[in-house]
Image (spheres, grey):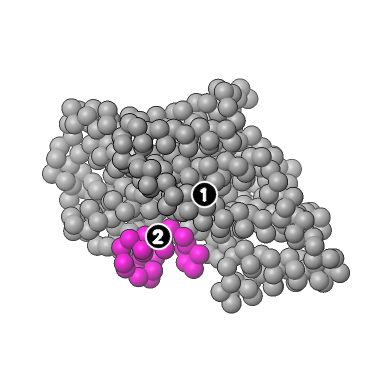
Amino acid sequence: MESFGVMMLAFVASIFFGFPIAICIGFGIMAALIRDGIPLEFIAQMCFAGLDNYTYLAIPMFILTGFLMETGGLSRRLVNFASSLVGNMAGGLGIVTVIACMFFAAISGSSPATVAAIGSMMIPSMVRKGYSPEFAGAIAASSGSLGILIPPSIPMIIFAVTAEVSIGEIFTAGFIPGLLVGTGLMATVYVMAKRRGYRGEGNAFSVQHMLSTLKDAIWALLTPVIILGGIYSGFFTPTEAAVVAVVYALVVGLFIHRELRISDLPRIFVNSAVTTGTVIIILGFATAFARYITIQQIPQMIGKAILAYTSDPTLILCIFVMLIFFTGMFIETAAQILIYTPLFLPILVSLGVSPIHFGIILVIGTELGLLTPPVGVNLFVAQGITGTSIGKLTRNVLPFLFSMLFCQFLLVFIPKLVTFLPDLVYGR
């Protein structure tokens, strides 16, 4: 336990010195290894062993899919279709942003990609209609976080590999929570728009217009149907589905919509490679971190300490929700999943909690981390689009944070909202 304390001390100190999160994790492991007299080669070995997993090939493919879809015009068509559904409603453009992010989330699997794709179109439109830049940015940042809750989702894949659960089951479990959180965000937009006097577009709902935009967006809307339908039918694995998504995005962008050009591909490949590299470096160090604490039996020690205080799984999940809300301010999404899964999952499973239920609670917790500085990636993406300060964005994002936190606690107390669909689909 002393080594664990040394590791966490080095980890936290590195965070406050401003090092990148992957380096902070590496420093933490290094300090613990030196304390135990273990050769530092352990870090390289564990990083390589942790990343040597076929399923992880889905991550760069889904990232590439998101960039291809954005450049190929699919995100614009999704926005037009979402706008046709809202009509003349207070805060209409903000609600359109949430709906469009929900659609795009089912394509990209990445929150920052969702914020960039939808926010770059919707934030300027909202500002032109009188929304403050910081409020518009807060809507896009919070809605974009749905990119990791509505399947397919890169963090869900990471959790499934770490927890050794079915990717198909965790994907299925994300639908109802995704709709719940999305509805909560739309309700928040509506209430705040009413208070601030942001009116609708002035165009009443029209079935004809809705059908017209649906026809234009049909190729984009078919993407999640093909990806998830192929996975659930057993036609291809999640990793193969990610490759299918890339090919589909290329074909639609180049030959159907014809908005994607061959000259765009080098830039898209470079951006995808940079994003993938960032994720993979964090994954490698976080995997080594998780392996070390497992070897040292830290989860068992923490489990005994928690069970000495309470054996109520609901109370433990509530404590976990508050813990991940705090640490999400400092620790990146993938790192949180790889650290907390081996720490908490064995305890909760022993108390009868479904690993799928825990996984969704964990993923929503990491969503909140995307909206809280200093590591709130979605805030920085929205800041780049709006040009406003992180402080103003953070103040405006607070109502959305509370809405998402409320939904998270609701899922803690009503686990059937998470497990109903997996049980139905997989016959449990």
Span highlighted in magenta in the image: 372-398
Rendered image quadrant of residue 10: bottom right
Question: Is residue 158 among what the camera can see?
Answer: yes
Q: Is residue 260 above or below residue 189?
A: above
- Identify the residue at horizontal 62%, vertical 58% (top origin): 281
Is 279 positioned to the left or the right of 194 in the image?
right
Rendered location of residue 350, percent (x, y): 74, 43
Is 233 a magenta residue? no
Dot 1, crowdedness within 10 Å: few (<14), some or many (≥20)?
many
What SS does tag 2 mark?
helix
Query: Which numbered tag is attached to residue 364?
Result: 1
Is 15 positioned to the left or the right of 39 in the image?
left
The residue lying furthest to the bottom in this view is 17
Q: How many marks can you see?
A: 2
Rendered location of residue 361, percent (x, y): 56, 47
Dot 2, crowdedness within 10 Å: few (<14), some or many (≥20)?
many
Cβ atoms under marks 1 and 2 closer than 8 Å: no
- State the residue in front, 353 or 279: 279
Label 1 or label 2, whichever comes before in sequence order: 1
Q: Is residue 220 above or below residue 36?
A: above
What SS does tag 1 mark?
helix
Write down the residue under mark 2: 381
Q: Is residue 409 above or below residue 218?
A: below
- Identify the residue at horizontal 20%, vertical 39% (top origin): 87
Nearer the observer: mark 1 or 2; the answer is: 2
Is 386 a magenta residue? yes
Check disc 2 and give the amino acid type.
Val
Check disc 1 and give the amino acid type.
Ile
- State the residue in front, 15 or 421: 15
The residue lying furthest to the right in this view is 37
